[in-house]
Image (cartoon, rainbow, N blue to C red):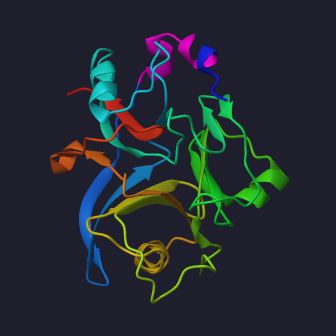
Amino acid sequence: MRALSALAALTLGAVLGPAPATALGCEEIRFDGLPYTICRVDMQQDDLRLFLDAPDGQPWSQFGRLDAALEATGQRLAFAMNAGMYHPDRAPVGLYVENGQEVAGLVATPGPGNFGLLPNGVFCFGDGRAHVIETRAFQADSPACRFATQSGPMLVIDGALHPRFLEDSTSRYVRNGVGTSTDGREAVFAISERPVTFHEFGRLFRDGLDLDQALFLDGNVSKLHAPALGRSDFGRAMGPIVGVAAPAP
């Protein structure tokens, strides 16, 4: 269940906090003839956070609402993406930790849909490092995460594509996900600009971006906020959001 009281008790300033300058870079690329947009986050310099509920206890839902709240504190939303699957009330599916507060617990059992297509994983970050970790490895090690969101399936596990991905699959959706460098200093987010298969999307991270660990965040409802590219997707209300806060110009 959602820990609304814990998050709603935070003041807007405590939730949003001060933001350092950003080293963020977003660009449009092609891999295997398919178009993608990627955003590289420097975990040493960029202020990457997860956002679920505003101080009033209601989900942020849209990039615009979150950006407006940041602007009121002298900041801006320099990058954002939907950060995992959610229930109809926009509560996270699986582990969700925001600024050290656990809102939802880890789910390590198989289940329906993409989330339950094991192995799935956790995007865990804070203190200048970010890692995508397979769920059962995460459960065994219990790493400390200032921020964490669980999703699935894994796209790349230790350099291998998810074993259930089929090269000749006909299931295509607009998809978004995140991969992390081996040293944890960089998180790379990607969204497809046209429907792609899981196999194609996994290969983007493994072969196109040279990342050994990558996690699927969602499909079909995938959205990106990248003002440097003149883009801020809107429409369907979101649950968890991952984003970089930066000083307002």
136 left or right, relative to 130:
right
Closest to the observer, 86 or 119: 86
Quadrant assignment, res 111 = bottom right
| The one of 113 and 60 positioned closer to us in this rendering | 113
Q: Is residue 67 left or right of residue 47?
A: left
Query: In the image, 17: left or right of 135?
Result: left
The stretch in magenta equals 6-18
Query: Which residue sits furthest right?
Result: 140
The image quadrant that residue 184 belongs to is bottom right
Question: Is residue 16 on the magenta stretch?
Answer: yes
Question: Magenta stretch mostly in which secondary structure?
Answer: helix
Q: Does 48 sit above or below residue 117?
A: above
Q: Is residue 161 visible?
A: yes
Q: Residue at x 64, y 23 (%)?
A: 3
Residue 192 horizontal/vertical position (percent): 32, 65
Look at 25% across and 26% down and name the residue there. Answer: 248
Q: Residue furthest left?
A: 230
Q: Is residue 42 above or below residue 102?
A: below
Residue 110 as seen in the image, left or right of residue 16: right
Q: Position of residue 135 (x, y in %)?
A: 72, 57
| Residue at 33% in and 33% down | 62
Q: Would residue 199 be counted in the magenta stretch?
A: no
Residue 17 appears in the figure: no
How many numbered circles are shown? 0
Residue 44 or residue 135, whichever sits in front = 135
Q: Position of residue 126 (x, y in %)?
A: 59, 40
Quarter of the picture holding the N terminus: top right
Seen in the picture, residue 16 relative to 234 is either above or below; the reply is above
**Quarter of the C terminus within the rendering:** top left
- Counting from the top left corner in percent of width and height, residue 51 is at 47, 32
Q: Residue at x 25, y 41 (%)?
A: 234
Q: Quadrant of residue 195?
A: bottom left
